[in-house]
Amino acid sequence: MRGPLIGLMIAACSLLLPYRSGAEHALWPWHGHHEDTWTSPGKGRTYYESRGEVVWEVPTEEKVIALTFDDGPDPEDTPLILDLLKQYGAKATFFAVGNKIALYPDLLRQEVADGHEIANHTYSHAYIGRNTPIERIRSELKRTEDIIYSTTGRTCHLFRPPGGTIMKGSFTP
């Protein structure tokens, strides 16, 4: 079942589906009706975007789409995804989980060799909630940054929280 689903995603991408206000970008913790789920009191999407701290979309008139894959590298899915991306000449961002990088470093290296972007998805796929200690969040992010760098020689510039949301106060010490 996995193969057809992946093929469908790539086929849809090859059609260059239009996005009304631009290509959705890699960080997307805002789900329309949950804006205050993750923001500080009185600070909404505009506040964080103006500071360059969070990006939801990139305005463009072009017909583009951003392909992203989470939770890998995975020995079953990642090679299939990489083959399909290569077949269609498409690039993607892979939001990698640190403990999976430790298990499958060659898959991460292949993602980089194929010209894809690597991003942080925590070390243990930890969900970040209001009661998550800031020390744990920092450790999850740093451990993943460190293993990405030691495996590929590259630093990553993007982070997507597992589940796609961050609760209010998560990054407040």
Image (tube, helix red, strand yellow):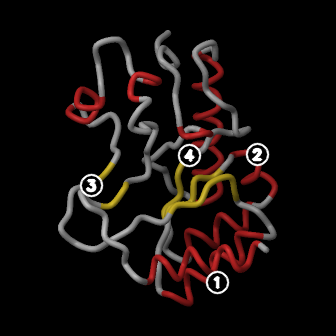
Quadrant the N terminus occupies: bottom right
Indicate the amino acid at tag 3: Val
Q: Regarding mark 2 in the picture, which secondary structure is present there?
A: helix
Question: What percent of the width, then of the height, locates residue 33?
Answer: 41, 32
Q: Of label 3 and label 4, which has the lower sequence position?
A: 3
Furthest residue in direction bottom, as rendered: 87
Tell me, yes or no, whether the two marked residues, 2 and 3, touch with CB atoms within 8 Å: no
Indicate the amino acid at tag 4: Asn
116 w.r.t. 132: above or below: below
Q: Residue at x 73, y 38 (%)?
A: 124
Residue assigned mark 4: 120
Q: Residue at x 48, y 50 (%)?
A: 156
Q: Regarding mark 4 in the picture, which secondary structure is present there?
A: strand
59 relative position to 101: left or right:
left
Residue assigned mark 3: 58
> How far apart are the alpha carbons under marks 2 and 4?
12 Å
Q: Residue at x 46, y 13 (%)?
A: 172
Q: Regarding mark 3 in the picture, which secondary structure is present there?
A: strand
Indicate the amino acid at tag 1: Asp
Q: Residue at x 45, y 47 (%)?
A: 158
> How far apart are the alpha carbons under marks 3 and 1?
27 Å
Residue assigned mark 1: 83
Residue assigned mark 2: 99
74 w.r.t. 102: above or below: below
42 w.r.t. 88: above or below: above
> How far apart are the alpha carbons under marks 3 and 4?
20 Å
Please tell me in which quadrant of the rendered image residue 105 appears.
Answer: bottom right
* Label 4 crowd (10 A; few <14 / some 14-19 / many >=20): many
